[in-house]
Image (spheres, rainbow, N blue to C red):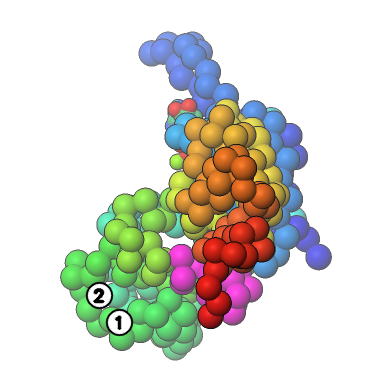
Amino acid sequence: MNLMVKARGLIHDYVSRDEDGNIEGKIRAIDGVDLDIRPGQFIAVLGHNGSGKSTLAKHLNALLNPTEGTVLIDGKDTTDESELWNIRQEAGMIFQNPDNQIIGQIVEEDVGFGPENIGVPTKEIWERVEESLRAVGMYKYRSKSPNRLSGGQKQRVSIAGVIAMHPKCIIMDEPTAMLDPSGRKEVIRAARALNDVEKITIILITHYMEEAIYADRVFVMDHGRIALSGTPREVFSNVEKMQELHLDVPYVTLLAHQLGRSGLKLPEGILNKEELKEALQSAVPSAFIGE
Ligand code: ADP
Ligand code: MG
């Protein structure tokens, strides 16, 4: 089976030119990235602003081509023009601002645009629209105007639009950045369900650490490179390294780490309240009065 994503030695330079076309400046946004993502994985990509996350995302959808190196999406080279539409259909993309992604006047019409554009027969379009809206829990809003939806609901409609293309992979570039806490939860829940139930590969770029704890694997970017990778527990065990990279760790992870530094014997990489409670229970059993 092909890897969903295989990048080797990926380099991306943004080149700026003056009026005569002479090179004025060059920014190396991706600086030698190797990446293996297997079908069905849930991947989180973290990194401070300007670390190259969006540039990387655009390579996974063939919106950009490598300056050097190669990117294969399900075995297809992103520089192969004849595979462009296959790559874009297989690897859908969700951006930050839901308002820029919705074009239809009615929810179901919006979700149907993609399949219609690639010539899916009408009857099948309606089947895809229904299944996609159900998959993100937005079916009951199918005849509403997108304008009347919350940010989280709009983002779920955008995701339905991508699902209607029957992708193998969805790349989400900070899909929750403009949402309130409940909208963020809705979108993450939808993304996890698509991964669990439909086995769609999810690549979630986020700066909310709590959204990364469910991932199979986390990649942390810094200056266009992958500075840290591993399971969420492995990555978040490196509290100091994460801080050097100007990133947080989840709140409970930090709390456990600080308690550890003040002398309490707790493991690193605690990811949620339950794990913290268990660790505390074995570290200071006398503090618990039974349940
Ligand atoms: P992130 O998504 O992690 O914030 P980006 O991939 O957007 O990072 O940016 C990586 C680097 O590339 C930054 O230094 C940014 O300023 C630069 N950059 C991004 N897009 C462009 C562009 N279209 N033209 C020139 N430089 C860009
Ligand atoms: Mg970005």
Marks 1 and 2 sit apart, C-alpha to C-alpha, by: 7 Å
Residue under the point 54% across and 34% down? 243
- Report which quarter residue 275 is drawn in: bottom right
Q: Eyeballing the image, is 125 above or below 15? A: below
Residue that numbered label 2 is attached to: 106
Residue 198's x, y, as percent? 59, 77
Q: Nearer the viewer, residue 149 or 158?
A: 149
Amino acid under label 2? Ile
Nearest to N terminus: mark 1 or mark 2: 2
Q: Is residue 25 visible?
A: yes
Residue under the point 53% across and 18% down? 26
Q: Is residue 87 visible?
A: no
Residue 85's x, y, as percent? 57, 58
- Report which quarter residue 151 is drawn in: bottom left
Amino acid under label 1? Arg
Residue 174's x, y, as percent? 43, 51
Range of the magenta residues? 188-205
Residue under the point 30% across and 82% down? 142
Q: Nearer the viewer, residue 45 or 11?
A: 45
Residue that numbered label 1 is attached to: 142
Residue 77's x, y, as percent? 70, 48
